[in-house]
Each structure stands twice: as C-alpha cells, then as structure tokens.
Image (cartoon, rainbow, N blue to C red):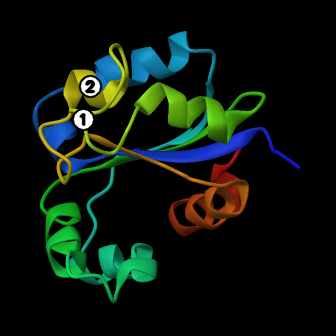
C-alpha cells in the first residue's frame, strides 16, 4: 500500500549552482508539503552508508566522492501517492531522457550529476528519511 511520504535530496551540483530555491519551488507547486528539510554535508563515510546498496557497483566510489563534494538539501515530502508522483516530477535519471519540465531536465548536468535524488519505493523512503532525520525532526 502506498504511503503519503517520500524522501528527496538536492545534490551537491544543484546546491552549488544556486538551484535549491527553484527546485523547492517546483516541489511545492506540484503539491508536496515539506515535512522536514535541512542543509547538510556528507562525509565520504556517511555517503557510503547511504548508498551501501550500490557498494558492489563500479560507480560506487565516484558516487560517494561526488555526494560528499558539497552541501546537500535532504527533505521529507508529503502528498498523496508521494513516491510515484515525485519520481514523475524529477524525471529520468539520465536528464537527456527526462521529460520536458521535470527537475532533472531543467537542472541536471549529466546522468551522474543529476541534481536530485528521489526514493524509489515507500520502504526506501522510510529508510532514507530516517537516515537524515530523527523522529523529532519529522512533523
């Protein structure tokens, strides 16, 4: 059964380029309510913990280095059908294949520097939210 919450984080490239505000505006205009949000800096170790599911993949080390290269903006979002609706809003991982008007089409530089993360399931949304936010930080 689908829940009404999902997790996202604006990635280092989009934060460094000053796109956080525009991305947050798109998220809110799409009907999502921000339940929790902060600016953070991941260490390579913490990035590795977050992306542990990819540890055996050839891109893992580069991913951890990239995700610890600058500030990120993690958020918990709320909306009916949150995970599926958010995945549609952000677009395909490869911005050249993303639909017009999606966050990745507008702000991503490449498949690896793709501006934003979005949970792919209700289960992962809960796990990823808890990684960044303690219970008292979730409203």
Q: Quadrant of the C terminus?
A: top right
Residue behind mark 1: 95
Which quadrant would residue 86 be assigned to in this image?
top right
In the picture provided, is 3 more to the left or to the right than 100?
right
Disc 1 is placed on an element classified as loop
Q: Earlier in the sequence, mark 1 or mark 2?
A: 1
Q: Tell me whether circle 1 and circle 2 mark residues in contact (CB < 8 Å).
A: yes
At 54% from the left and 52% from the top, the residue drawn is 119
Say whether residue 90 is left or right of residue 136.
Answer: left
Q: Which mark is residue 105?
A: 2
Instruction: Give the SS element for disc 2.
Output: helix
Q: Residue at x 20, y 38 (%)?
A: 15
Q: Position of residue 48 (x, y in %)?
A: 32, 80
Residue 74: x percent and y percent?
43, 48
Q: Quadrant of residue 62?
A: bottom left
Say whether residue 75 is left or right of residue 136. Answer: left
Across and down, in percent, residue 129 comes to: 59, 58
Residue 130 x %, y %? 62, 65
């Amino acid at each position: 059964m689908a829940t009404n919450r999902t997790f996202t984080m604006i990635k280092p490239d989009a934060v460094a380029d000053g796109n956080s505000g525009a991305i947050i505006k798109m998220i809110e205009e799409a009907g999502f309510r921000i339940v929790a949000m902060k600016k953070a800096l991941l260490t390579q170790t913490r990035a590795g913990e977050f992306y542990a599911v990819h540890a055996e993949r050839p891109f893992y080390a580069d991913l951890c280095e990239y995700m610890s290269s600058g500030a990120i903006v993690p958020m918990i979002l709320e909306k009916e059908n949150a995970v599926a609706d958010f995945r549609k809003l952000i677009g395909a991982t490869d911005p050249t294949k993303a639909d017009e008007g999606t966050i990745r089409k507008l702000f991503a530089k490449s498949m690896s520097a793709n501006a934003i993360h979005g949970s792919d399931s209700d289960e992962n949304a809960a796990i990823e939210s808890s990684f960044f936010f303690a219970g008292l930080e979730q409203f």
